[in-house]
Amino acid sequence: MDDPERPASAADVHAVAAGMPHVVVDGSPDRPVYQVGGKSFVFFRSPRPDAVDPVTGERYDDVVVVWVPDQAEKLALVQDPGSPWFTTPHFNGHPSVLVRTSRLAELSVGELTEVVQDAWRCRASVRRAAAWDAEHRPER
């Protein structure tokens, strides 16, 4: 990673997700779905009625869905109203958070990288996650 403190971008989402081991990219070029072991962990979704601009009512066309390990992690990311991470009633009970690409610059590359890597880890097989941890997070 170049500068972990610089503002994140959509290109960083793609780079981090695609850079994880055993990743397959499905979907279309403009709406990719990153998968490990046949399980999605990050995807760029099409505009949906559950994520809209509160002023105009227009559907957001830049939403990225990122899996999280559990509800506690989800709440930690979405509970601050100033955070770019959010959820919608459609995702109640689902272990994922949403972020608009237009707000990614509010995160550092390091922060984004940690969330995307955790998404991969919680969707990868136990064996793959343990092997990755042993190489990249030996302190755990």
Image: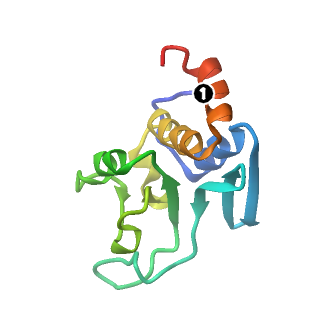
Q: Position of residue 129 (x, y in %)?
A: 62, 33
Residue 108, placed above or below residue 50: above
In depth, the one of 126 and 48 nearer the eye is 126
What residue is shown at x 41% (from left), y 43% (from top)? 107
- Residue extending furthest top? 139
Where, quadrant-wise, is the N terminus in this rendering?
top right
What residue is shown at x 67% (from left), y 60% (from top)? 33
In depth, the one of 122 and 115 nearer the eye is 122
Amino acid type, residue under disc 1 in the picture? Asp
What residue is shown at x 24% (from left), y 53% (from top)? 79
Q: According to the image, what is the colour scheme of the structure?
A: rainbow
Quarter where residue 15 is shown: top right
What residue is shown at x 67% (from left), y 25% (from top)? 131
**Is residue 61 something that shows in the picture?**
yes
- Residue extending furthest front? 126
| In this rendering, position of residue 48 left or right of residue 79 | right
Residue identifier under label 1: 2
Q: Secondary structure at mark 1?
A: loop
Residue 86, placed above or below residue 119: below
Q: Position of residue 45 (x, y in %)?
A: 57, 69
